[in-house]
Image (cartoon, helix red, strand yellow):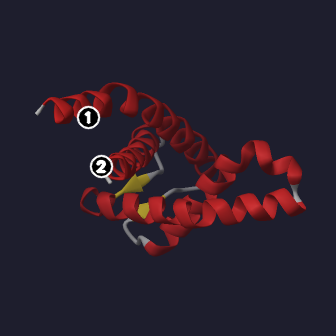
Amino acid sequence: MIRFLLSTVAYLIANAVGLLVAVLLLPGFTIDPLAFIVAVAIFSLVQTVLGPLITKVSFKNFPQLMGGIALVTIFVGLFVTDIFMASMEIGGIANWLAATLLVWIGSLVASILLPIYVFKELAEKGRNA
């Protein structure tokens, strides 16, 4: 149970980092600070639900997409989040493409580094207590 909670928190933080990277680097990409947490939750939920579906559809119909499935899932996640969040603005087509790439890179780096440095230390402290 603890492992599941840590994994979920790491996933949410990684997605938050990815969105934050896009907000900081893209001039047309904005999320209202108060709505940021809701945007991260919606984005993460969409990725969790649609990720396997997109993978399955891609595997059957478009096997060439399998290498970029994470980018497709992030793009769809951004699209759905943008629809539901009035306080989120992505901008033009260039921003959509750049945001997809930046969110992917940011969340990828965070999802690699968080378990290694942050959660490993927390888990060790929990075992010692």
Discs 1, 2 touching: Cβ within 8 Å: yes
- For image coordinates 18% across by 36% down, the residue present is 126
Q: Secondary structure at mark 2?
A: helix
The location of residue 45, given as percent across then percent down, is 47, 65
Q: In the picture, residue 53 is in which quadrant?
A: bottom right
The location of residue 49, given as percent across then percent down, is 56, 67
Mark-to-mark CA distance, 1 and 2: 9 Å
**Would you name the residue on which mark 1 appears?**
123
Quadrant including the C terminus: top left
Q: In the picture, residue 121 is in which quadrant?
A: top left
Disc on the earlier residue, 1 or 2? 2
The location of residue 93, given as percent across then percent down, is 65, 54
Front residue (pair 77, 22): 77
Q: Secondary structure at mark 1?
A: helix
- For image coordinates 23% across by 33% down, the residue present is 122
**Would you name the residue on which mark 2 appears?**
2
Front residue (pair 115, 41): 115
- For image coordinates 41% across by 28% down, the residue present is 113
